[in-house]
Image (spheres, grey):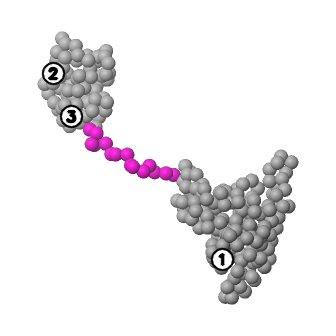
Amino acid sequence: MPKVSVKVKWGKEMYPGVEVNTDDDPVLFKAQIFALTGVQPERQKVVCKGVTLRDDAWGNFKLTNNALVLVMGSKEEDVPAAPVEQTRFVEDMNESELATALDLPEGLINLGNTCYMNATVQCLKTVPELKNALLNYDPTSGGGTAGGLTSALSETMRSLEGGGAGACAAAAARLLHALHAAAPRLAERGAGGQLAQQDASECWTEIIRALSMRLQSTPESHRYYKNILMSDSLYVDHKTIVR
């Protein structure tokens, strides 16, 4: 009996008297169901007496007259669209994305035991008068190794103010090179060839020495950052991302 008349039930909808030719491929029956329900064939699950209809063969899917065929599946417009921007979880973010999400200040990449330099730069950045002087520093003013170090620090400050991770990484590399030129002992390497760990206070001293030679202060700020920078300690309440 290749041709039978069945009842198709989809949700609350019932479609009686649906003619099916079992000599045709099952996909044609699914096309009939699509015409009735609007459910795309690939979204359909068609069941009769506990057997699911395949696309390529009827197999054990036996139809008889007046048999009840259950259809499961939703129309395409009933399926919620995937969000254009997928939800990102904190644990799935890299350091740069995490810093952006938490609105943290940009940090400097660790170039190999250079945390001492990064920490020194972040401390100096918290002194408004000093930061402004560096942001306005003319890198073409020369001045030997002190001028080179001051110029590199000026570039680093500008990168930290909004240059992005790539600019900060490049600036950190140039600052490290200038620091090594000004203080060769900070360029020492270990037995494996990696940069040796250094004392942050030595880095602080070398940078302050260079800045005191190259930066021009205003009368109003001179006493302020002379006292701060030449003191033995600077207390900072600051959060940042150090890569």
Q: CA distance from mark 2 to mark 1?
A: 86 Å
**Measuring 70% from the left and 60% from the top, which residue is drawn there?**
174
Residue beneath label 2, please?
19
The local secondary structure at tag 3 comes to: helix
Image marks 2 and 3: residues in contact by CB distance under 8 Å: no
Of 236 and 183, the residue lying toward us: 183
Q: Say which mark, if any, is on residue 37.
A: 3
* Amino acid on which the number 2 mark rests in the picture: Glu
In the picture, measured across the screen, residue 115 lies left or right of residue 9, that is right
Residue 72 colored in magenta in the image: no
Judge whether 3 appears above or below 37 on screen.
above
Res 157 visible: yes
In the picture, measured across the screen, residue 149 lies left or right of residue 22, that is right
The local secondary structure at tag 2 comes to: strand
**Measuring 27% from the left and 22% from the top, which residue is drawn there?**
27
Q: Position of residue 47 (x, y in %)?
A: 28, 25
In the picture, measured across the screen, residue 195 lies left or right of residue 28, that is right
Q: Say which mark, if any, is on residue 198.
A: none
The local secondary structure at tag 1 comes to: helix
Q: Which residues are magenta?
A: 75-89
Q: Position of residue 156 (x, y in %)?
A: 66, 65
Which residue is outermost to the bottom?
219
* Amino acid on which the number 1 mark rests in the picture: Ala
Earlier along the polypeptide chain: callout 2 or callout 1?
2
Of 107 and 163, the residue lying toward us: 163
Q: Mark 2 against mark 1, which lies toward the viewer?
A: 1
Quarter location, residue 65: top left
Judge whether 191 appears above or below 107 on screen.
above
